[in-house]
Image (tube, rainbow, N blue to C red):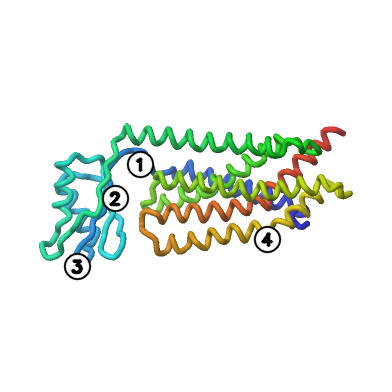
Amino acid sequence: MFITKYKKIFLSLSIILVVVSIVFIFIFGLKPGIDFKGGALMEVSYANSRPEASLIEASIKKINISQALIQPTGEFGYLIKTRDLNETEHQALLKALLLDNKNSVSEKSFTSIGPSVGSELTRKAIVSITMVILAIILFITYAFRHVSRPVASWKYGVITIVTLLHDIIIPTGIFALISHYTSAEVDTLFILALLTILGLSVHDKIVVFDRIRENLRGGDKMSFGETVGVSTSQTIVRSINITLTVIFVLVPLYLFGPETTKNFALILTIGLFFGIYSSLFFASPLLILVEEWQAKKRK
């Protein structure tokens, strides 16, 4: 019942986190990766030892390829992101990376994405997130169609969307802060992480709301706020255990996984953490707040 008792504190904390995250997004911005702005991504590996990044950067500048982003990967490798390259520039870049004949370099992968493809991926990413949100609100409205009192079923859907926005805005804001001080960029894996957060987070909220629905049908002589508090308490252990199970898998992926999936694991971990928080400490208090507002309006 402490969730009901301290609902204003939980709501205030969520609002503060969302506002701060939005400020981070507007101040620092999000760096689009080559998936969205176009460019080339090359992964190379050196035979004996990894040379200093500054030496590679200086060598690349000599062939007039500016603003190359160099990231270490593996034991002896580098990920190199540049503007879109033609085949001649691609081969010139590969030669420039061969700093020492005694330390050969091998190309493990090369991907080139044009600006038009990047624009198409951006459009598809926006459409995908929008369609997922609309599908969620329609599904919840249908699933809770028999719950009309004291809160209408469609309001469950709206509250779910509000909390899901909470779940993706906060990790996006944190990512904007991280990318300001590092080379982290928004790529398709970042969008995939947000979509995964939406899918896993809505599951937690449906579990909580379904328990509220069952307790409302039970006919217990409790106020709506008490019913929500009891229902949330009944699901809190299950929700936390399920989320922790996923996070326990993501942490090793971030620590020991390839460089290309680190941001995916990080954003997904942050999103799931705040997703479970919003299911228990934001969605439920928000539902109580809506009911209290309706009660005052009827008076």
Which residue in the rendered view is the most extreme toward the right? 221
Local crowd at mark 3 within 10 Å, few (<14), some, or many (≥20)? few
Q: Amino acid at mark 1?
A: Asp
Q: Amino acid at mark 3?
A: Asn
Q: Amino acid at mark 4?
A: Val
Residue 196 falls left or right of residue 69: right
Quadrant occupied by the N terminus: bottom right
Where 280 falls versus 51 (above or below)? above
Residue at image point 23% right, 56% down = 44
**CA distance separating discs 1 and 3:** 31 Å
Say which of marks 3 and 2 sits in front.
3
Residue at image point 57% right, 61% down = 244
Say which of marks 2 and 4 sits in front.
4
Say which of marks 1 and 2 sits in front.
1
Residue 215 falls left or right of residue 197: right
Mark 4 = which residue? 237
Where 204 falls versus 238 (above or below)? above
Q: Amino acid at mark 2?
A: Leu
Where in the figure is residue 199, as x and y percent of width and height?
A: 56, 46
**CA distance separating discs 1 and 2:** 14 Å
Total label count?
A: 4
Say which of marks 3 and 4 sits in front.
4
**Dot label at residue 48:** 3
Considering the numbered disc 3 on the image, is that residue within a helix, a strand or a loop? loop
